[in-house]
Image (cartoon, helix red, strand yellow):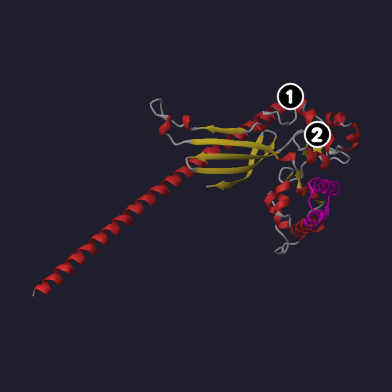
Amino acid sequence: MKTGRRHQRGAALLLAMLVVTLVATLASAALWQQWRAAEVENAERQRGQASWILTGALDWARLILREDARGNQNSGNADHLGEPWAMPLEEARLSSFLAADRANNVDDVLQAFLSGEVIDLQSRLNFLNLVRVTARGAESRVEVSPPDLRAFHRLYELLDLPRAELDAAVERLVATTEQGANDPRPSPTALMPAKLAQLAWLGIGPASLAALEPHVTVLRERTSLNLNTASPQALSASVPGLDLAQAQRLVTERERDPFKQLTDAARVVPAVADQLSDQLHGTRSSFFEVRGRLRLDDTVIEERSLVTRNGLDVRVLWRERIAGR
């Protein structure tokens, strides 16, 4: 009988331990679920705040570009790197502006830091300038633009990139354009790129894309190269006979006095004056990339947007988030 009682006490103790373990497990699970729900809510709140802040930054950049266009219309000035839109915004603390009233302590407010810049995309050679469509519909004709192809050949040479890669990419671009212009059936060719990274669809390798990024862009409309904002490499590639030393001289002169017309640049390097063309070169820009970076507590969010400016009308063509952690 004593042995049976000891067994009963042991079974009761074991059952009590199991109950305690089960209660502790359920309590831990409930606590974890509560913590997880709080973290998800906090992350969603941060994403919402970041989206509104970056949207406000984009609208502010559009306002600056519109006011710059208004000033250019009144003064006849060109677009250059000394204008307000070209000045990058270094990381600035926004938390001090988030307090609801004077009684709030800034240290208790969510810490937010914003930085960004506006890039003139017409400071770069447009890859889609390489092809021209002379008509529409059944009579459309797609051909390579010889002056633009020569410019890209020179750029590839300056950057020490494989020319065969460029020629193969141009062939694919022509095939894609022809397929899109003449054949409604699904295309076996690569899609038409809309961003620089998508040139990989045409066979441009990662190393080449990294080297080309400061000098090349992808825009669906034909664009000219802005002599006031282009890099020396882009200038040398775009203007036949212009070496890097002469291109650097143009850069130095435009920093002192931005070019209002092509004739201003021609006076700096008279030897290539006849190579400057209104079809290929200019001193004003219509396409810009707006980049914004927001650091919100431990979260970093970056966005970039393609903005087009037609007179005082500044529109966003696309917007994407490029990084976040």
State yes or no: residue 143 in magenta. yes
Q: Earlier in the sequence, mark 2 or mark 1?
A: 1
Residue at screen point 87% across, 41% down: 240
Q: Main SS type for the magenta part?
A: helix
Mark 2–mark 1 Cα distance, whole angstroms, equals: 27 Å
> Which quarter of the picture shows residue 28?
bottom left
Measured as percent of width and height from the top left, residue 207 is found at: 71, 52
Q: Furthest-front residue in view?
A: 3
Residue at screen point 70% across, 28% down: 82
Give the residue pinned by disc 1: 75
Instruction: Give residue 248's mark.
Output: 2
Q: In this view, does 219 lie to the left or right of 302?
A: right
Residue at screen point 52% across, 39% down: 295
Measured as percent of width and height from the top left, residue 266 is found at: 86, 31
Q: Can residue 259 be seen in this view?
A: no
Quarter holding the N terminus?
A: bottom left
Report the mark closest to the observer, 2 or 1: 2
